[in-house]
């Protein structure tokens, strides 16, 4: 089930503390969702991913957590490198591996090249 949490901090606190209080999710689940790219914050007028759970946030910072257990819980096979031509690479993407992320998270960091 998809749940969106929109939090504005009222005091200086870490991202995981603020999100855990607002969502009633454990800090471990919050950290996992953050590592997978499901947490966003406003920085200089832009919305960017926040992956560090221990980030100290000032009062008034807006956080958004897009929590979807079905996306965050996926464990697909890893992609296989087929060819590396320096300017680009070709990968075999197994069924179930998401090709790109969304605000709900990236379940597999594809390809380092």
Image (cartoon, helix red, strand yellow):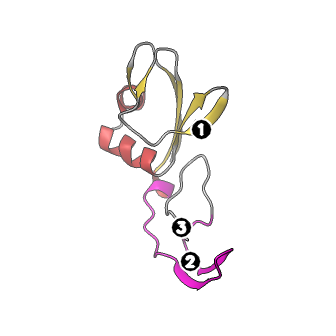
Query: Which residue shows up at 45% across the image and 43% down it?
Result: 51
Which badge, 1 or 2, comes first in the chain's sequence? 1
In percent of width and height, residue 80 lies at 52, 81
Query: Which residue shows up at 59% across the image and 28% down it?
Result: 42
User: For mark 2, does the 10 Å Cα neighbourhood hold few (<14), some (14 to 19), or many (20 or more) residues?
Assistant: few
**Which stretch did the figure color magenta?**
71-99
Choose mark 1 or mark 2, whichever is in front: 1
User: For mark 3, does the 10 Å Cα neighbourhood hold few (<14), some (14 to 19), or many (20 or more) residues?
Assistant: some
Disc 2 is placed on an element classified as loop
Which of 2 and 96 lies nearest the eye of the viewer?
A: 96
Tell me: residue 17, above or below residue 30.
above
- Viewport quadrant of the C terminus: bottom right
Tell me: residue 71, above or below residue 60.
below
Cα–Cα span, label 3 and label 1? 20 Å
Magenta stretch, overall SS: loop
Which of 24 and 100 lies nearest the eye of the viewer?
A: 100
In percent of width and height, residue 70 lies at 48, 56
The residue carrying mark 1 is 48
Which badge, 2 or 3, comes first in the chain's sequence? 2
Disc 3 is placed on an element classified as loop
Q: Is residue 5 visible?
A: no
Query: Which residue shows up at 59% across the image and 38% down it?
Result: 48
Which of 45 and 6 lies nearest the eye of the viewer?
A: 45
Q: Is residue 81 visible?
A: yes
Disc 1 is placed on an element classified as strand
Cα–Cα span, label 2 and label 3? 13 Å
Which of 81 and 37 lies nearest the eye of the viewer?
A: 81
In the rendered image, residue 93 lying in the magenta stretch gets the answer: yes
The residue carrying mark 2 is 95
In percent of width and height, residue 25 lies at 36, 37
The residue carrying mark 3 is 110
Tell me: residue 61, above or below residue 53.
above
């Amino acid at each position: 089930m998809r749940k969106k949490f929109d939090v504005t901090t009222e005091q200086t606190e870490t991202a995981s503390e603020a999100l855990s209080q607002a969502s009633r999710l454990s800090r471990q689940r919050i950290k996992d969702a953050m590592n997978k790219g499901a947490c966003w914050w406003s920085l200089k007028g832009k919305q960017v991913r926040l992956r560090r759970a221990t980030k100290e946030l000032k009062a008034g910072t807006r956080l958004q957590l897009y929590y979807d257990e079905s996306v965050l819980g996926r464990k697909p096979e890893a992609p296989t490198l087929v060819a590396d031509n320096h300017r680009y690479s070709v990968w075999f993407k197994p069924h179930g591996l998401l090709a790109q992320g969304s605000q709900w998270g990236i379940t597999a960091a594809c390809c380092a090249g």
